[in-house]
Image (cartoon, helix red, strand yellow):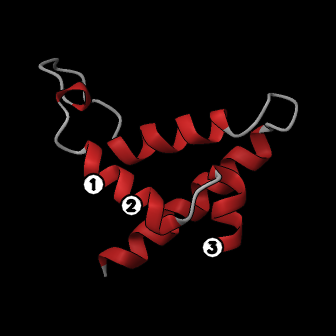
Amino acid sequence: RPDKFRESLRVSSYTFNQICTKLASDTVFTNNSPNEQIPLADQLAVALYRFGHDGDGVSMQTGWAWQRNRKKARHRSEL
């Protein structure tokens, strides 16, 4: 749901995708380590979520619900 996406990350899904596109070529999101780096979209989502909440509004339940919905949306867009 777009309203929940905006409520959680404080940006629209369109803006989120545009930011991901702009950042995708930045070398800070790559590494030469044998350990995989967390995907850019996940890193951005965590940062935006934290920037948009002052700490008292962050709950594990909200975070997990948001993550579950984001994964469903990503799966639908890949179909």
Figure check: 15 above or below 54 = below
User: Where, by quadrant of the figure, is residue 44 drawn?
Assistant: top left
The answer to whether mark 2 and mark 3 are in CB contact below 8 A is no
Secondary structure beneath dot 1 equals helix
> Residue at the spot x=16%, y=20% of the render?
34
Tag shown at residue 21: 1
| Outermost top residue | 33
Within 10 Å of disc 1 (Cα), the crowding (few <14, some 14-19, many 20+) is: few
Which percent across, then down, holds residue 14?
A: 45, 68
Tag shown at residue 17: 2
Residue 13 vs residue 58: left or right?
Answer: left
The quarter of the image holding the N terminus is bottom right
| Outermost bottom residue | 79
Residue 7 vs residue 11: left or right?
Answer: right
Secondary structure beneath dot 3 equals helix
> Residue at the spot x=65%, y=55% of the render?
66
The quarter of the image holding the C terminus is bottom left
Secondary structure beneath dot 2 equals helix
> Residue at the spot x=34%, y=51% of the render?
20
Q: Amino acid at mark 3?
A: Pro
Figure check: 72 above or below 41 = below
Q: Amino acid at mark 1?
A: Thr
The answer to whether mark 2 and mark 1 are in CB contact below 8 A is yes
Report which residue position mark 3 lands on.
2
Residue 26 vs residue 56: left or right?
Answer: left
User: Where, by quadrant of the figure, is residue 12 drawn?
Assistant: bottom right
